[in-house]
Amino acid sequence: MPLIIPPYIPEGYEEDVVDLDGGDIRGLVIGKSVRLWWEHGVPCPCRTYRTINGRTNATGEPQQTCTRCGGAGIMYVNGQQIIGAKASTQDSLKLYAELGPHAKGTMLVTLLPEHVADHLDRYTLLDGCRTHSELRKRKGTVDRLRYPVLTREFTSGSEDDASVAVQRSIGVQFCMASDAEGTVTDVELVEGVDFEVNADGRIDWTLGDGLGTAPAVGEHYSIRYYARPRFVLEDHIFLTRDLYVRDNGVLCLTAMPVKALLVLDFLGGEPPVADDNPQPTSAME
Ligand SMILES: [Zn+2]
């Protein structure tokens, strides 16, 4: 006989009823939100086949030449703009000290219930900016960096008079290459002179090739630039948060906002996806 243990519900208590107002909580998320670009991360169906002793079998590995995942095994689909309420963001200096640029930065975000996430999902903070530095080996006329370069428009003071407002538009903050022997050139490469940032947020070396200042294909360069912070989902807090709420005397199962812990994206390679450089599709109202 199955062991059945009924819950103890003292008289006067209602079962499964809370006093939260779903509408109010939704309003709080909407009222304190920022724009995010949300991409669903799903396993890529590509597989590597090998023939051994006349028998062909899938190895279980993604294809290193796959055009959807680039060998990472994850592809991103359904890219779209959503909103979320940011609770906190931080970059972990301790991990940075141990692991270098693979530091584990986190962001806690509250999302509307229609945006329930899954592990592997990727979030780009459209209303955010961070600085990223990296070492690259030139691959071609156009180079893709770890993140798309964000051209940041902002106001600063003039160099002569801090009370005079100057509009600035900056993507790359610093760039310097080494030569074929690996020796640093000591020549700073300047955006708009030696290279340009194209619409995909990538480095186009055409200008520097014309001037003879660009590094040759295969040579290294160091680059520091603005980028939108990109995160992947690490943890669902309240994976599902649907509750019974009494509304004008009627008991309704109400979907509540969900909380997600996001970490800065340093997963594997750089999957080639359509929405590599997401842009806001609508303004906040
Ligand atoms: Zn693939």
Image (cartoon, rainbow, N blue to C red):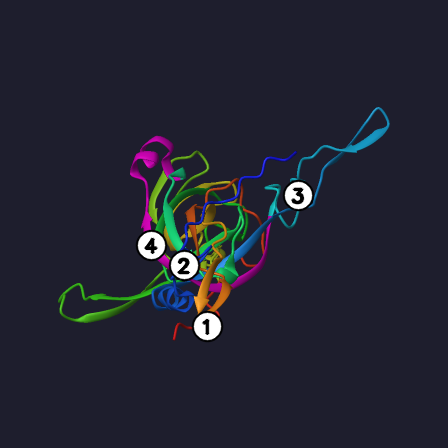
Other residues around mark 1 within 10 Å, as few (<14) / some (14–19) / many (≥20): few
Q: Which residue is mark 1?
A: 282
Residue located at (34% from left, 47% from top): 187
Mark-to-mark CA distance, 3 and 2: 52 Å
| Disc 1 element | loop
Q: Amino acid at mark 2?
A: Val
Q: Nearer the viewer, residue 160 or 22?
A: 22
Q: Earlier in the sequence, mark 4 or mark 3?
A: 3
Residue at (63% x, 35% y) in the render: 2
Could you say whether the residue bearing mark 4 is in a helix, strand or loop? strand
Residue 58 % position (x, y) = 75, 35
Question: Which residue, given by chain and number where applicable, does mark 4 sit on?
Answer: 87
Question: Which class describes the residues within 10 Å of circle 4: few (<14), some (14-19), or many (20+)?
Answer: few
Q: Magenta residues?
A: 75-101
Q: Sequence order check: which comes first, mark 1 or mark 4?
A: 4
Residue 180, image x and y in percent?
Answer: 46, 37
